Amino acid sequence: SILVFTGQPHNREHLVEMAEWLSTGKGIVTFVQLVPGNTEQLMKSGAVDQAKEEIEQYIKERGLQAFGTSVAADSFVSGADVIMQSHGVGGLSSNAILMGMGGSVDGLTVQMHKVRRAALFGKSVMMLRYHQERGWGSRATIDVWWGGMGSNAPLMLLLAHLVQIHPDWSGATIRLLQIINDESLSEASLAELNRLLEEVRVDAEPKVLVRKDGEKVGDIIRRESTPTDLTLLGLQAVEEDEAENYARSLIELTQDVGSSLIVHSLTGGEILQTS
């Protein structure tokens, strides 16, 4: 099941759309708004209940298969901790978090704390950077970038597949891309990509790119994925002292491509498990 940090969903329609595509009517989706401030005062004023009612009204008007909730907390950070640890529906705890990606270094640095905490609580994390001008483009191409290590690839491919099979993305093509430093490893790397695709049973076009001397990984990604409608990239749960530099590099990496979904997989497993 997916916990979506939307605030009031009508202000973040792109997050709602992504949640719809990923759930495909089978997973459990919950939209949550964190209401920061004095908890006692917020509860007495009815602000928290009102926020929840507004989310539920939005869900009803949109005809969504989802739940809504709101949480009062002293801060966004403490509120996120509470909801990530405690949230569940029908005895099932959420195992994935979806949130928007901050556009500033300071904002994204704070979000990296949330990523670390989510990993600690056993959650996979997806951060959506929505391109305000291009939107979802023509909804025809999806790129998945894999560094060759870690457990992100199976989950990223699953997410790409879930988007692809939604009617909104009918006929979209998925590419699985990997950058290598040694051209002599091209054949083995391509075989590994094909093995991975067979293992996860996702129909995608594998592509291996050889990095030239002095060429930056980010430049290759931007060159290949700038025309792409949705790009999936791996996300690291970096330590606090590395968060600011990592946030800066992530913003730089994604600013020239279309809408991007940045993924940190805890297990690489199924995020829409319903039993």
Image (cartoon, rainbow, N blue to C red):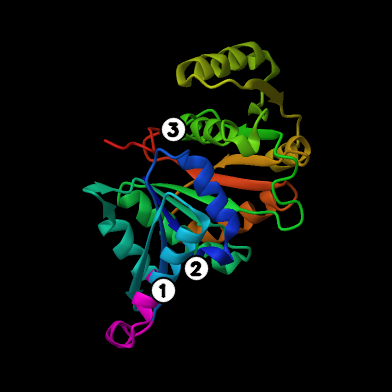
Amino acid under disc 3: Ser
Question: Secondary structure under badge 3?
Answer: loop
Tag 1 or tag 3, which sits nearer the N-term? 1
Amino acid under disc 2: Gln
- Report the front residue among 146 and 92: 92
- Around disc 1, counting alpha carbons within 10 Å, would you say few (fewer than 14), some (14 to 19), or many (20 or more)? many
The N terminus: image quadrant? top left
Amino acid under disc 1: Ala
Q: Report which residue position mark 2 lands on.
A: 8
- How far from the left and from the top, in percent, is residue 130? 64, 54
- How far from the left and from the top, in percent, is residue 73? 33, 75
Q: Specify the segment rendered in magenta.
A: 37-52
**Marks 1 and 2 close (CB-CB < 8 Å):** yes
The C terminus: image quadrant? top left
Q: Is residue 51 magenta?
A: yes
- How far from the left and from the top, in percent, is residue 3? 40, 53
Residue under the point 50% across and 19% down: 196
Query: 205 left or right of 165?
Result: right
Q: Report which residue position mark 1 lands on.
A: 51
Q: Report which residue position mark 3 lands on.
A: 151
Q: Is residue 75 visible?
A: no
User: What secondary structure characterizes most of the magenta part?
Assistant: helix
Residue under the point 53% across and 30% down: 157
Query: 118 left or right of 179?
Result: left
Tag 2 or tag 3, which sits nearer the N-term? 2
Residue under the point 49% across and 63% down: 58
Q: Which of the 4 image quadrants contains residue 209?
A: top right
Q: Which of the 4 image quadrants contains residue 104?
A: bottom right
Toward the left, the furthest residue is: 91
- How far from the left and from the top, in percent, is residue 93? 27, 49
Query: 149 left or right of 168?
Result: left
Question: Secondary structure under badge 2?
Answer: loop
